[in-house]
Image (tube, rainbow, N blue to C red):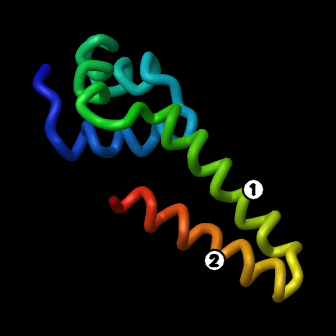
Amino acid sequence: MKITVFQIEEAYYRAVWGESVRSLARGLGVDESTLRQHFRKGTPPRHIRELAWKYFHAEQARGRLDEEQRRICDAMVDKVLAVRAI
């Protein structure tokens, strides 16, 4: 069975949220390796999920800072982003 772009995107979204690729492939009626091959073209769902959790925890920690600490933190982030842009 041929898989559509919409099905690949939907499967990718569900994989990011933790559903197994094997389960997704079975539900779509395609081989697991076919689905994984499509996923290899972008960032693996596992990495997206890990990044989302890190971002969530960073935002939680930032929220616990007082105003001055938050300002310093934001200034440091701006410096890091400026260096990366070079």
Q: Amino acid at mark 2?
A: Ala
Q: Which residue occupies the foreground of this view, 82 or 45?
A: 82
Which quarter of the figure has residue 83?
bottom left
- From the image, which quarter does the N terminus lie in? top left
The residue closer to the viewer here, 71 or 1, is 71
Which element type, helix, strand or loop, lies under badge 1? helix
From the top left corner, tell me how far across and down residue 79 is, in percent.
54, 69
Category of crowding for the residue at label 1, using alpha-carbon neighbours closer than 10 angstroms: few (below 14), some (14–19), many (at least 20): few
Q: Secondary structure at mark 2?
A: helix
CA distance for labels 2 and 1? 19 Å
Up the image or down, 44 lies above or below 70; here it is above
Left or right side of 25 for 61: right
Residue in the foreground of this view, choosing between 1 and 49: 49
Looking at the image, residue 52 sits to the left or right of residue 11; the answer is: right
Question: Which residue sits at x=23%, y=16%?
Answer: 34
**Crowd rating for badge 2 (residues with CA inside 10 Å; few <14, some 14–19, many 20+):** few
Q: Measuring 42% from the left and 57% from the top, which residue is drawn there?
A: 84
Q: Which corner quadrant holds the C terminus? A: bottom left
Q: Position of residue 20 (x, y in %)?
A: 51, 24
Residue 60 vs residue 18: left or right? right
What's the mark number on residue 43? Answer: none
As drawn, 25 above or below 51: above
Farthest residue to the bottom: give it.
67
Residue of label 1 = 57
Q: Residue at position x 37%, y 18% from top?
A: 26
x and y, in percent, of residue 48 in the image: 49, 42
Decide: is 13 above or below 2.
below
Q: How many marks?
A: 2
Disc sitting over residue 75 in the figure: 2
Q: Nearer the viewer, mark 2 or mark 1?
A: 2
Closer to the N terminus: mark 2 or mark 1? Answer: 1
